[in-house]
Amino acid sequence: MKQKLIILDNGGATFDRYTIIDRLTGDMAGASDNPFHPLGFGQYCGNVADNYWRIAYGYSWRDGCNKRLLNKRIKYAIDLFLADCGNVGEVVEFSSLPEKVQQFAKQSFRG
C-alpha cells in the first residue's frame, strides 16, 4: 500500500494539508489532519492523468489505449505533476502521516 501512494504535505499552509496520489491510477485525494471529523476534510480530488491528457485529447483520451499505453500515460502525467508540485507540498513518507490520515489513505485507495 505505502509504495503505491505518493503523499504531499504543504506543512499546514491550507486546511487540506495532505494530497494523496495513487501511483497506479493517478487518482488524488485531499485530507486535513483529521479527515473523519465532521469539520475535517477528506475527499477525492480528481485524477492527475485526466487533468493532463484531457487538454491534449479531450475526455476520451483513454479510449483506444491498451493497458501498457494507459499505464505509461498515467506515469508520465504523475512525473510531470511531481516535477512542478512545489505549490502543493513536499513529498513525505507514509509513516510520517497522522494515524487518521493513514487510515483515510488506506480506505480511499484500497486496491
Image: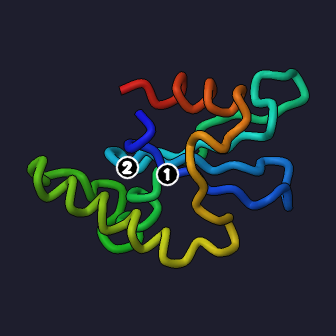
In the image, what residue occupies the spot 62% across and 31% down?
102
Residue picked out by circle 2: 23
The secondary element bearing badge 2 is classed as loop
In the image, what residue occupies the spot 78% across and 40% down?
32
What amino acid type should be assigned to the residue bearing mark 1?
Ile
Q: Kindly indicate the quadrant of the structure image that contains residue 69.
A: bottom left
Q: Kindly indicate the quadrant of the structure image that contains residue 43.
A: top right
- Badge 2, how many Cα within 10 Å: few under 14, some, many 20+? some
Q: Position of 78 compared to 90: left or right?
A: left
Q: Nearer the viewer, residue 2 or 10?
A: 2
Q: CA distance from mark 1 to mark 2?
A: 7 Å
Q: Nearer the viewer, residue 102 or 44?
A: 102
Residue picked out by circle 1: 6
In the image, what residue occupies the spot 71% across and 34% down?
42
Specify the quadrant that holds the N terminus. top left
Specify the quadrant that holds the C terminus. top left
Name the residue at the right extreme.
39
Indicate whether 10 appears above or below 18: below
Q: Nearer the viewer, residue 17 or 66?
A: 17
